[in-house]
Image (cartoon, helix red, strand yellow):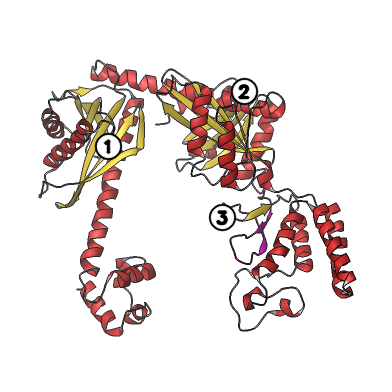
Amino acid sequence: MFIIEDELKKLPDKPGVYIMRDKEDNIIYVGKAISLKNRVRQYFRKNNKTARIEKMVSLIDHFEYIVVDNEAEALILECNLIKKNRPKFNVLLKDDKTYPYIKVDLKSNFPGVYITRRLLNDGSKYFGPYANPGSAKEMLDFIKQKYKIHQCKTLKERARPCLNYHINRCLAPCMGYVKREEYMEQINEIIDLLEGKTDKILKELELQMQEEAKKMNFEKAAELRDRMQAIDRVSTKQKVSNISENSIDVIGIAKSELQVCIEIFFVRGSKMIGREHYFYSDLKDMIDKEILSGFIKQYYLDNPNIPNKIMIREEIDDKDAIEQWLSTTLGRKVEIKSPKKGEKLRFVEMAELNSKVTLENREKDKSEVLLELKEVLKLDNMPRKIETYDISNLSGENMVAAMCVMQDGVIKKNLSRRFKIKTVFDQDDPRCIEEVITRRLKHSIENPNGGFGKLPDAIFADGGITQIRATKKAIEKYNLSIPVFGMVKNDKHQTRALMDENRKELEISETLMNLITRFQDTVHDTAINYHRKVRDKQITKSQLDEINGIGKVKKQALLKEFGSLEQIKHASVDDLVRVKGITKELANKLLEILNS
């Protein structure tokens, strides 16, 4: 749980950029500061604020910040983040638009060339950004005039070619009038043009022009001459860059005795546009370059957004092999650099500084939570791994359970597990809890390195003494001594206390209470969502699969067309017969059964 007053105390007295977010995690404001400590605190103090700032502050759920070296860097970073995220309360830059790019749709057999403001990892090539939208349009108009490529958004077969073919502006690939190889010669030349390789184009065109002149094809030679002149003119006016050629990820690392924080800054077009950070436990015995090597291989394994350069503090041992692998994956050269001076070194230092600040804040939060838990629960060791369980059913039907894990004071959703109840056939939550925890403990006892990991240091039962006893009954089957505590709710279904096995309620801080509440809400939501999924699947199965004449193919076609069973119920016979394989007789039968 993010407690604003606690986080304000951690702010460093350093220049940087702060990012305000609402409860949906949307960025609502980005600002810069000479001192993050002084500036951010001002928003939450009682002083004269404008109505707009008052409203903005009322929406702040949490904030983050990035430390930089000086105010100038903070200003540049602030502008880049505002341009990328367009927060609603940044008045002066709110209307700032994303810059246009020219897109070559290489995933198509006959690629088109378009203007777009969205950069997608879809196999296309993007060129830009164009600071002046008119320049992008001018370049695209030039391409359309000088190259015979299709100009329709979707390339569909036609009964006859469009006007562009008749005025010699398109080779009509939609009619099959041109082979792909011939069409791609134009696309490759357009890509060279957009990459600024005009010298190469002009040289090739001049050779082609001379060849055509020798063959007495003077009309073709004149056409090539005109294209050369036009390219020469446009190359002096346009300065374009392929964004992928200026794409850098900067990685910083910070370590403590318990864990490692790795921070990645994304630099595009010489501007920092965002960051991510990751935490790893139990790596204190590894040296930095080993950690970085392992991280790079994991991070980019299934990541389509591979940059041209990765910058780190020190060179890793398997640098050449990783470069070769990434270059092959990307289809062009990827370098891993360890800069020693200049702007690039400062980016690495900034990433390292921010990873250190992020880690220090996390360590402080973790240690405080774990120490309080240890003291309140009167445990001999730190409760680094805590598990909780919840049962979900509707009148004893489709009974399921969920398990959630809190590791080192952090709720780990990726460690959640789901269960179908196998041995209980009526609505009896304690017996369901006993079954599920028995099965869970058996997993770790039989396979400590399996998907459930090691045994928990404590279990928080979702409820009072009845759930505590059911949990302990499962634990005692294996002669284990795992402490159990109940998470008790009030009449409004809100967590109000922790309870021990003697029914004694334990006093805990507001911060810890908020964390436990979120822990209980998380397992509750996980169980409900799983129950809903199982129930919906069962309903769909019982009502569609048992109708004679509705097989798997027709069932999928119906659900694809209408989206849900409820929509099928409300469809007309005419709507249903439009689905392949559904006759009028079958449609009437279907509606009769579903609405009975």
**Mark number, residue 84:** none
Q: Quadrant of the C terminus?
A: bottom left
User: Image quadrant of residue 580?
Assistant: bottom left
Q: At which x and y percent is residue 137? A: 75, 60
Question: Whole-Å distance between the Cαs marked 3 and 2?
Answer: 41 Å
Q: Is residue 463 visible?
A: no
Residue in the foreground of this view, choosing between 189 and 482: 189
Quadrant in which residue 554 is drawn: bottom left
Q: In front: mark 2 or mark 1?
A: 2
Of badges 3 and 2, the one in the foreground is 3
Judge whether residue 340 is colored magenta.
no
* Left or right of 569 on screen, residue 397: left
Q: Residue at x 21, y 38 (%)?
A: 491
Q: Is residue 90 left or right of residue 563?
A: right
Q: Which residue is mark 1?
A: 494
Residue type at mark 3: give it: Asp
Dot 1 falls on a residue whose secondary structure is loop
317 is higher (above) or lower (below) than 526:
above
Q: Quadrant of residue 191?
A: bottom right
The residue that disc 2 covers is 35
Mark 2 burial class by Cα count in 10 Å: few <14, some 14-19, many 20+: some
The residue indicated by pointer 3 is 122
Q: What's the CA distance linking mark 3 and mark 1?
A: 45 Å
Q: From this viewpoint, is residue 127 visible?
A: yes
